[in-house]
Image (cartoon, rainbow, N blue to C red):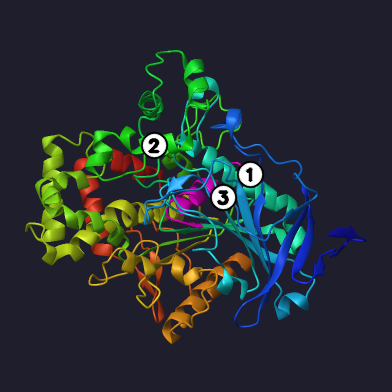
Amino acid sequence: MLRSGGRFIFTRLCSSMKVKVPVKQGVVVGQKKKLANGLEFNSFLGVPYAEPPVGELRFRSPRPLQRFVEQELDCSKERNVSHQRDPFTLEVAGSENCLFLNVYAPNGARTRNSLSPLPVMVWIHGGGFFFGNGNSDFHFPAKLMEQDVIVVTLNYRLGALGFLSLPEEGIHGNMGLKDQRLALQWVQENIASFNGDPNNVTLFGESAGAASVHLHTYARHANRLFHKAIMQSGTGNMEWVFQNEAAVKTRHLAKLLGGGDFGSDTKALLAFLQSEKVTPTGILANTMKVLTSDERRRHLPFAFKPVVEDSSSPDSFIDQNVLELMCKKDSLAGMPVMMGYNSAEGLAMVVKAKQKLEAYEDDLARMVPRNLVLDPQSPVAQEAASDIRAFYFNGQPLTRENLDNLVDLFTDYHFSMDLQHAAEIHASCQTQSPLYFYRLDYVGGRNMYKKIFQNEDLRGVAHADDICYIFQMAGDDAEMREDDLLVTERICKMWASFARDGKPSESWTPIQKPQADKPFQLDCLLIDRELKMCANPDGERMDFWRSMYRRYRSKFYEALRAKL
């Protein structure tokens, strides 16, 4: 696209089904396609946004790609995902060379009749920073495109390749987050060529993708590379987000890979980890072995994750404790934010728990949050576990008859407790930034992850089920059930409306700043067959956890309250 006299002139060339769009790095050759309902759109798949992070660039911050290998790059097919083990098939997939994105641009009636650029939504996938991808097998944005928004999905480095840390040698960690940041930079430089508005970019994601989005909102590039944020089932303050004992894990991995003990010779350590002796398959095969005993006990199987970077990092993503960042007054500078969770997130975790209920029965202290009781082996941890048993299980043993209660505990421990806490901090400290909060309650025919987890007999909406109502699977032209279609279109309309002007709907009211000497009220939209506002979702359970922090961490609790 060329600029002439202040107007945009499209230089797209449609030869049969091909579409050519000039970008900074060359020309991308995509395809013009049509949805089952007749909506035309252009797709550009597997667009490289960085140099391949291989060889000496392994573990390094991503480098922008200056030019394509060919002047005209075929973008009709998706390229590699990040190297990983598929959690469902258990097969190894992907490659180190994985820094690609996909652009989906609708050609709807409103689009054709208007020269106005479209809002842009950039999706960051979840998967515990260890698996997942942004490709169309799970993230085809058909219904979002119907709302006249451009959608960009992307792949970023995962596991040790994306989050190993060795600051002594300039490996400051967070490469995967910096990949995401560079993809946002690519969008800023190029999205206008696809009729997208670089000044109206919404970053949205789920689980680890949502935690990533939350960290992006407190980074220096917020309000510059993107302007609104949606966090689905994830925030940066959740217990599973940040890496523990990063230095120990790096050295342990090297030892497992046959490198021995490098002692203080970090230069040799890095040379070994970047050598051809160390393969992505070898890294993957040994990653779970570096988990700490406490991580194994809590069944948190994600070893390499974000870190707070050393002050010497030249391109730091995050260099402060996330709670401190969250409590800085109005640091988001008015950015509209949406966040929420699914009613039974814990259905994902109860899969393994069902196989070893006796282990949880014998050691419920593994469900005591790390920041509640600092020594997980102490008698105080056992006392806290007794309180948890009394509240969630009425003092009774864990059995298959009270699995719904265990799901509630997993939901709160892994997701909703910290997410609601993030909302309360936001309402108090980011008073210029409207926050819209939701809980997804709808159980229908597209709750795919609930089926995969084989938990259809239990109540609620499983972790990741929301994805199935926002995205579709490429090539899936099966008709939706009437109620599924209603909920899908309703969610996509609200998400796109938020991306367009920062407000999801007229009836969805943002959270209000807490009033002095009054309990915090969390205004929340319940998303089901009907939409309705409520106050304090799962309030009794949240009150229980507040009482636990008052009892076991009174100084920590009061210090945090004082900042609000």
Image side of residue 315 versus residue 17, left or right? left
**Residue 447 rendering spot, x and y as whole percentages:** 37, 71
Magenta highlight range: 205-221
Nearer-N-terminus badge (1/3): 3
How many residues crowd mark 3 within 10 Å: few (<14), some (14–19), many (20+)?
Answer: some
Towards the viewer: 387 or 22: 22
Q: Mark number for residue 243?
A: 2
Answer whether residue 536 is visible to the viewer in this image.
Answer: no
The residue at which mark 1 appears reads as: 182
How many residues crowd mark 2 within 10 Å: few (<14), some (14–19), many (20+)?
Answer: some
The residue at which mark 3 appears reads as: 80
Tell me what residue is drawn at x 37 percent, y 75 percent.
442
Quarter occupied by residue 28 = bottom right
The type of residue carrying mark 1 is: Leu
The type of residue carrying mark 3 is: Asn
Tell me what residue is drawn at x 31 percent, y 34 percent.
289
> Separation of disc 3 and disc 2 at Cα?
26 Å
Q: Report helix, strand or loop for mark 3.
A: loop
> Separation of disc 1 and disc 2 at Cα?
22 Å
The N terminus, quarter of image:
bottom right
> Separation of disc 1 and disc 3 at Cα?
17 Å
Image side of residue 381 versus residue 420, left or right? left
Marks 1/3 in contact by CB < 8 Å: the verdict is no
**Residue 261 rendering spot, x and y as whole percentages:** 37, 16
| Residue 208: in magenta span | yes
| Residue 33: in magenta span | no
Towards the viewer: 307 or 94: 94
The type of residue carrying mark 2 is: Gln
Label 3 or label 2, whichever lies nearer to me, is 3
Towards the viewer: 551 or 497: 497
**Residue 359 rendering spot, x and y as whole percentages:** 13, 48
